[in-house]
Amino acid sequence: MSKIGKLPVTIPAGVTVNVANNLVTVKGPKGELKQDYNNLVKVEVKGTEVLVSPAVESKDANAAHGLYRNLIHNMVVGVTQGFSKTLVITGVGYRAEVQGKMLVMNLGYSNDFIAVIPDGLTVTADKEGKVTISGIDKQKVGEFSADIRKLRGPEPYKGKGIRYETEVIRRKVGKTGVK
C-alpha cells in the first residue's frame, strides 16, 4: 500500500469535492478542475476529507493509489492557492514580453519566438527578464514553463539562456591561454 496514498486529502472551507462516474470535480474560489480515474482505486468523500484506496490488490492498483491521491491533492491546492513558476531569461539582448495571448521572446536568434499562452494560465514578464507563469492546474503550469525553457536552455559557460528561478547552473571553466 502506498505511503502517500494512505494520507487523506483535507478539504478546506470554500472548496467542494464531488465524486461521480469515475470523475472527481473540485470547485473552489479560483475555479474548477476535473480529473477522471480508473477502476483500480476507490475515491470517497467523508466529511472534510477525501479518501483514496485501492479497489483490488495488485501492483498497478498500488501505483494508481498514490498517483490519484496526489492528483486530487494538487487539484485542491490549485483551486485555493494556485501554482506558479518563475523563469529567468539571462543574456545580452534576451527579453520577453506579453502581447495579448502571446508571449514574444527575443533569445538571440534572427527571429523572435512566439508562444501562445494556453487557456487557464496567466503570464507576466518584467524588464529584469523574469517571466512568471501561474494558474490553477499544476500540470499545465509545469508543461508550459518546460516548453518555454526548452527554447533556449542555459549554457554552462556564461549562463545565458532560460532557467528556472530556483535552478542552479553548474558553471564550467572556459579555455585558458597556454604559456
Image (cartoon, grey):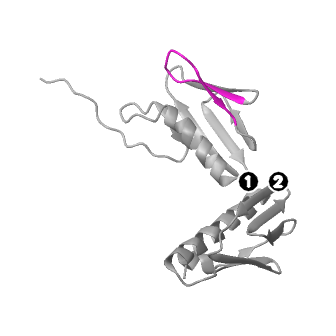
Say which residue label 1 marks: 82
Where residue 67 sits, quadrant-wise, is bottom right
x and y, in percent, of residue 98 in the image? 70, 28
Q: Which residues are magenta?
A: 102-117
Mark 1: which secondary structure? Answer: loop
Judging depth in this view, the residue of 108 and 23 nearest the camera is 23
Looking at the picture, does residue 68 appear above or below residue 95? below
Residue at the spot 59% in from the left edge and 83% down from the top edge: 56
Q: Amino acid at mark 2?
A: Lys
Confirm or deny contact between disc 1 and disc 2 (CB under 8 A). Answer: yes
Asked whether, in this view, residue 146 is left or right of residue 75, the answer is left
Q: Is residue 113 magenta?
A: yes
Splitting the image into 4 quarters, where does residue 119 fall? top right
Tell me the SS state at disc 2.
loop
Foreground residue among 125 and 8: 8
Q: Residue at x 49, y 46 (%)?
A: 167
Q: Residue at x 67, y 42 (%)?
A: 133
Residue 15 vertical position relative to residue 179 in the rendered view, above or below = below
Q: Quadrant of the N terminus?
A: bottom right
List x then y, in percent, for residue 57.
55, 84
The residue tagged 2 is: 30
Q: Is residue 177 above or below residue 167?
A: above
Are there few (<14), some (14-19), or many (20+) residues within 10 Å of tag 1? some
